Amino acid sequence: MSVPIPLRRDFDAPSLRRLARTSKDANQARRLLALAGIYAGGTRSQAAEMGGVGLQIVRDWVVRFNAGGPAGLLDRKAPGQPPRLKEAHRRALAELIEAGPIPAIHGVVRWRLVDLAQWLWEEFRITVSETTLGRVLHKMGYRKLSARPRHHAQNPEALAAFKKSSPPAWQRSRAARRQASA
């Protein structure tokens, strides 16, 4: 059997209980109370039972507490996957977008997410979904803009003549009608 990792010397059971009482995070309070049990002379097994976890988890709490104090017992956000697009890829993508597509070379007249994802694959061999690429471009400051389609032979005079004019929504009051009829 191995020797348990000792707890920090700058805390004691009453101070940990006080911190647990003032904590806004329930998980941190539970961990502080379990460690307070160890400070009070209890075993690690009793602390595990008090915290509702196994011995390995109590050991992890002790390591986190020794490294970061009570703040080390707060829940941390999981790191997640590292981004696929590095800064160099983002710069190249921004340059491509700013330059705009050349129909003879790129085969498109405006950039769509699917076209940019295909370019990233051809250029860097990086697979990125359209949703992720849209999120990345939004973070880079780009917005999705699309021109409102207009027929090339549209006649502005015909549009004005086609517009319907509605009758006015207001009506004369009874008093005004009486005066007009009198």
Image: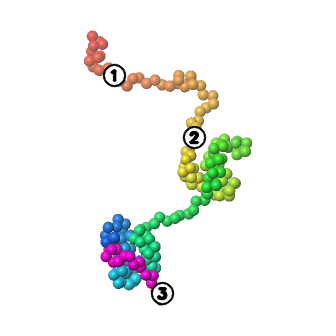
Residue with the mark numbered 3: 2
The answer to whether residue 73 shows anywhere in this view is no
Q: Secondary structure at mark 1?
A: loop
- Mark 1 and mark 2: span between their CA atoms? 42 Å
Left or right: 103 in relation to 44: right
Residue 64 occupies which quadrant of the picture?
bottom left
Instruction: Indicate whether 128 appears above or below 178.
Output: below
Prevailing SS of the magenta stretch: loop
Q: Residues within 10 Å of mark 2 (few under 14, many from 20)?
A: few
Say whether residue 128 is left or right of residue 177. Answer: right
Q: Residues within 10 Å of mark 1 (few under 14, many from 20)?
A: few
Q: Residue at x 49, y 65 (%)?
A: 78
Q: Which residue is mark 2?
A: 146
- The residue labelled by disc 1 is 171
Outermost residue on the top side: it is 182
What is the C-alpha distance between the residues marked 3 and 1? 94 Å
Q: Amino acid at mark 2?
A: Ser
Q: Position of residue 171 (x, y in %)?
A: 34, 22
Residue 11 drawn in magenta: yes
153 or 109: nearer the viewer: 109
Camera-nearest label, 2 or 3: 3
Q: Give me the residue at 40% from left, 82% from top.
A: 44
110 vs 89: above or below: above
